[in-house]
Amino acid sequence: MRSKRASTVRYDLNKSKRKMFSNLKVGVVYFFYVYAVNSVSVSPLSSAQKLMAA
């Protein structure tokens, strides 16, 4: 049986390569995805990067 967990989507649309997310909870695992946009197209979504907040 799967446990029910709340999901929240957070995003950072600034043009900087450095992304910062606040209010992450220590010990919680987060999944991050990235994609690129330019004047011609949008890239495919990346593979998930799994990180635990410390």
Image (spheres, grey):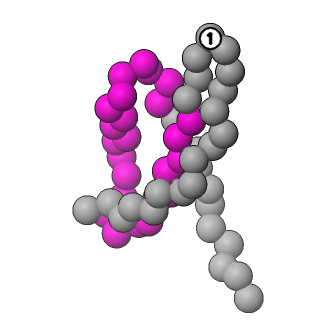
Disc 1 marks which residue? 39
- Quarter residue 45 falls in: top right
Vertical order, 42 against 28 (above or below) = above
The reply, left or right, for residue 20 in relation to residue 8 is left
**Residue at the image position 47 percent from the left and 30 percent from the top:** 12
Q: Which of 45 and 3 is in front in this view?
A: 45
Residue extending furthest toward the bottom: 1
Disc 1, SS? loop
Instruction: Specify start and end residues of the magenta stretch as a single range.
Output: 12-35
**Residue at the image position 37 percent from the left and 40 percent from the top:** 21
How far across and how far down the image is residue 54, in percent? Answer: 25, 62
Q: Nearer the viewer, residue 17 or 54?
A: 17
Main secondary structure of the magenta stretch: loop
- Quarter residue 9 falls in: top right
Residue extending furthest toward the right: 1
Residue extending furthest toward the front: 40
How far across and how far down the image is residue 52, in percent? Answer: 36, 64
Say which amino acid is labelled 1. Ser
Q: Quadrant of the N terminus?
A: bottom right
Vertical order, 38 against 52 (above or below) = above
**Residue at the image position 36 percent from the left and 46 percent from the top:** 23
How far across and how far down the image is residue 24, in percent? Answer: 37, 52
Q: Which of 53 and 25 is in front in this view?
A: 53
- Quarter residue 50 falls in: bottom left
Residue extending furthest toward the top: 39
**Residue at the image position 62 percent from the left and 56 percent from the top:** 7
The total number of labels drawn is 1
The reply, left or right, for residue 40 in relation to residue 14 is right
Per the image, is 29 magenta?
Answer: yes
Check disc 1: other Cα within 10 Å, few if <14, some if 14-19, many if 20+: few
Per the image, is 19 magenta?
Answer: yes
